[in-house]
Amino acid sequence: MAGTIQRIKEFIDSQGFTVASFEKLVGFSNGSLASQIKNNKSIGVDKLENIVSKFPEISPAWLLKGEGPMLRSAEFEISKNPKPAPNAIPINIPQPGEEEDLELIKREDSTEFRHLGDDQYLVICPLVEQYAYAGYVAGWSDAVYVDDLPRHTVVMKNLTLGVYRSFEVRGDSMDNGLRKSFADGDILTGRKLYQKHWRSKLHIHKYKYFILVTIDGIQIKEIIDHKVDEGIIVCHSLNPDKEMYPDFELSLADVREIYYVKARTEPLD
């Protein structure tokens, strides 16, 4: 599988990793993969399984035989065993400035990933606070504006790389009084779902809750249906008051960004 080892290196380069950081992500011993790449040696099936398990977006046909595209379709970009309302892992998060001492895994579109040790990773991304909703709707595509936003940090397991944003929940439309609902002041961290993936069925049974950046504002909703041919999603609020918060249809033509919720951070007070 000499060709396979070079394709692994191609994937590493395309994702902006170092070989050393990639080794840690997939659980290889320090320097083992680097040696195999340098000497163009074959790689064992067990190691290939580790790679595909950690990076399910890699096409096995491409990895093993060089056939087809490197990456599979959007359905494989969602991490395994997702939870309906995943929460941040309780751990001592480094204080501001201390994160610079942690190993940098990758930096992408204002999102930074650092290794905490074991299988835990620090995600550092822009935070859109309640008062900044209108500003973000106007400036979401402006890299300078986004870089100037405050930062939010959250610890995750089974890291899926990509572009992340955090949003402070405003209002009680997603609060039904239960533990897994979203209350005013909670911070939700989501992973970006690119527009090219909106043309196929959204995986609303895997990740139920979405942050929608529209031409009219920012909404956090459960998507209960996606009418692909019409380009329409049906949005649902958790609040049981349906006179105040009825289900509604939203045209994807009016949506600028979609993030699916990966973590929730509750305020301390």
Image (cartoon, rainbow, N blue to C red):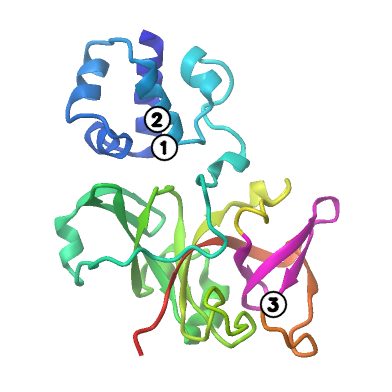
- Whole-percent x, y for residue 142 in the image: 48, 65
Give the labeled residue for mark 1: 54
Magenta stretch, overall SS: strand
Label 1 neighbourhood size at 10 Å, few (<14), some (14-19), many (20+)?
some
Q: Residue at x 57, y 74 (%)?
A: 137
Give the labeled residue for mark 3: 237
Q: Could you tell me how far apart the alpha carbons at marks 3 and 2 are, in whole angstroms?
A: 38 Å
Q: Nearer the viewer, residue 43 or 137?
A: 43
Classify residue 110 by image quadrant: bottom left
N-terminal label among 1 and 3: 1
**Badges 2 and 1: C-beta atoms under 8 Å apart?**
yes
User: Which three-letter amino acid code belongs to the residue tagged 2?
Assistant: Ile
Q: Could you tell me how far apart the alpha carbons at marks 2 and 1 are, in whole angstroms?
A: 5 Å
Locate the N terminus and report the quarter of the image it occupies: top left
User: Which three-letter amino acid code belongs to the residue tagged 1?
Assistant: Lys
Side of 80 relative to 148 (left or right): right
Task: Give the SS element for disc 3.
Answer: loop
Q: Nearer the viewer, residue 20 or 216?
A: 20
Q: Residue at x 72, y 73 (%)?
A: 236
Locate the C terminus and report the quarter of the image it occupies: bottom left
